[in-house]
Amino acid sequence: MMDDAKKKALKRFSIQTQMEIVKMISRVPAGHIGGSLSITDLLSVLYNKHMKIDPKNPKWENRDWLVLSKGHCGPALYATLALKGYFPMEQLETLNSPGTNLPSHADRNRTVGIDMTTGSLGQGASTAAGVAVGMKMDGKDNKVYLILGDGELNEGQVWEMAMMASTKKLDNLIAFVDYNKLQIDGRTDTDEVCNLGDICAKFAAFGWYAQRVDGHDIEAIDEAIANAKDHKGDPSVIVLDTVKGNGWSRIADTAGSHSRGVSPEELEEALAEMQTVMDNI
């Protein structure tokens, strides 16, 4: 069980991340806000409790890796990295600007703390598994954490990786599915686009240790990650029930939140709503 003080601290970090996301996107015509907001609770638990990292030595060989396969949600990871001290907070003001080190999709050659370049959906799954294989070959006990979008599961490459990862018994690979049930063209839990069905059952059929939890419950995420770490012999997947656009009621659970701008009035509204939640924790 996580103590109450730690739980509150992790939730506050998540909300701080959300506030930085909306501020970043308010400075550009549009950005991938919905799917960025839905993963901040996960990122808070990973970067503040489970991952072996050193912000002062981002290339540390014994670090755990984070592969954000849904690379268009880079703003969530950028805000997390800045809050953890990988680079100055002021750099967040340059999102998507000419010459920026914070492009619209995650780029390991541009951004300090990004372990893998991503954006072409499905490819991050394969590269994460490849890194996990390499760590096994080197005899390391590092973990590779992989974040997949639910719409991304439409990509066949994800399932090719799932088959290989179980064959190679990559128990150092822990994947998360951000199951916010919306992709750019509609819902993922109905036949509107491509119904994903029982995601846990699908991964389990491929030989994965599968769990499903509330993706906005800090303690539930923490316990699921601990279970995955303890499970030996199989790769793990944790399906997170999340809300696209979580934290800002105007856009929450709407397909239109996938990519949009944030007006000055909306920025004020979103920050006030998030601050109210923060104050009541």
Image (cartoon, rainbow, N blue to C red):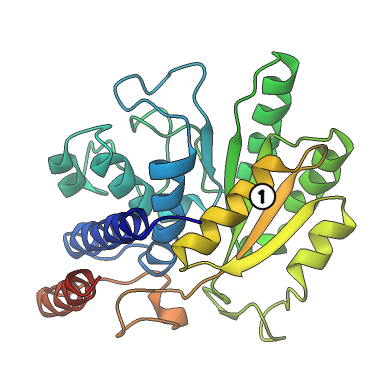
Looking at the image, the residue that sits furthest to the top is: 138
Q: Quadrant of residue 271?
A: bottom left
SS for tag 1?
helix
Residue 193 locus on image (x, y percent): 67, 80
Viewer-proximal residue, 157 or 86? 86
Is 26 left or right of 133, judged from the image as shown? Answer: left
Tell me what residue is drawn at x 84 percent, y 42 percent: 166
The image shows residue 241, relative to residue 174, as above or below, that is below
Q: Quadrant of residue 186?
A: bottom right
Tell me what residue is drawn at x 76 percent, y 65 percent: 200
Tell me what residue is drawn at x 38 percent, y 43 percent: 48
Residue 280 locus on image (x, y percent): 21, 75
Residue 37 locus on image (x, y percent): 37, 65
The residue to which callout 1 is attached is 227
Is 139 left or right of 265, judged from the image as shown? Answer: right
The image shows residue 226, relative to residue 30, as above or below, that is above
Tell me what residue is drawn at x 37 percent, y 23 percent: 58
Residue 271 in sight here: yes
For badge 1, the amino acid type reads Asn
Residue 220 locus on image (x, y percent): 54, 63
Q: Quadrant of residue 128?
A: top right
Viewer-proximal residue, 80 or 234? 234
Is 93 left or right of 22, judged from the image as shown? Answer: left
Residue 121 in sight here: no
* Image quarter in which the C terminus is found: bottom left
Question: What crowding class fits label 1: few (fewer than 14 Cα within 10 Å), some (14-19), or many (20 or more)?
Answer: some
The image shows residue 281, relative to residue 122, as above or below, that is below
The image shows residue 86, relative to residue 8, as above or below, that is above
